[in-house]
Amino acid sequence: MRPSAKFKYLDHQGVLAFAHRGGDRVAPENTMAAFQNAVGQGYRYLETDVHASKDGVVYAFHDDDLNRMVGEDMAISTLTAAEIDGLQMQGGHHIPTMAELFETFPEARFNIDAKAWPVVEPLIALINKTQTHERICIGSFSDKRIKTVRRGVGDVCHSVGPMGAARFRLGAWGRLPLSYAAGAVQFPVSEFGVPMVTPASVAYAHQRGLQVHVWTINDESTMHRLLDMGVDGVMTDDCALLKKVLLARNLW
């Protein structure tokens, strides 16, 4: 049974369906077209990653460098906002700013992965300026980055970093009565060959007041298996497929 939501961000009927980087089946990841497609299908939760330009503008972009998405051998953090705005991804798509996403999709909620330290202070400033505290969940592969963002914006919804994940695994293994400030744990199905999402770990999370969100699932049978375990959220690149699965199970 899903625990009561600690944060308004997590208050949602049914399973939280996340469009991972907006999805990539219709348009390239982290483009306005991808996010628009997800929202058009009815997605309310959009996942993205953020980096900052050299002059402190927050962009929705996953990689540290521009090789894969733009074909330029340079780090995104070395460019000014004006230079980034002049770039195009395959298909002529621009790299959107986080402010643009907040404004274009006012009903959407965003799961934001702060990918590097240079984006932390600009992200804090943007959240405070746009007053989007209840529309965000902060994640990162750095517990310290999550903590720093929270210190700057208040106790917003957040997941756990690597140290928090290790603590959760230990707690779940030993069924320890640990307390967690996070609203959710967000895991892959397995990591380094170790199962991260099992019926026992989901049950433990719920006992400790945590939701369980799983990434990145693009296989129908795995979606069903995870939903059978009682996970609270699924992140996918294939928005149409996840919607179909959830509709079939009356969970959309």
Image (cartoon, rainbow, N blue to C red):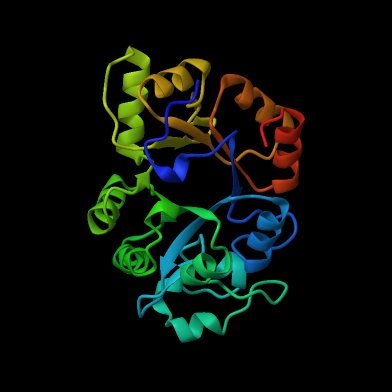
Q: What residue appears at the point 73 percent right and 54 percent down from the top-left corner?
A: 25
The one of 162 and 227 positioned closer to us in this rendering: 227
Determine whether 86 is above or below 151 in the image.
below
The one of 221 and 67 positioned closer to us in this rendering: 221
Q: What residue appears at the point 38 percent right and 41 percent down from the top-left corner?
A: 7
Q: Quadrant of residue 13?
A: top right
Give left or right: position of 51 versus 189: left
Q: Residue 251, percent across and down?
A: 66, 32
| Quadrant for the C terminus in the image | top right
Give left or right: position of 131 versus 23: left
Q: What residue appears at the point 42 percent right and 34 percent down from the top-left corner?
A: 5
The one of 52 and 75 positioned closer to us in this rendering: 52
Q: Quadrant of residue 53?
A: bottom left
Q: Residue 83, percent across and down?
A: 49, 85
Q: How many marks?
A: 0
Q: Residue 47, percent across and down?
A: 53, 52
Determine whether 247 is above or below 208 in the image.
below
Q: Residue 43, percent across and down?
A: 64, 50
Give left or right: position of 217 versus 98: right
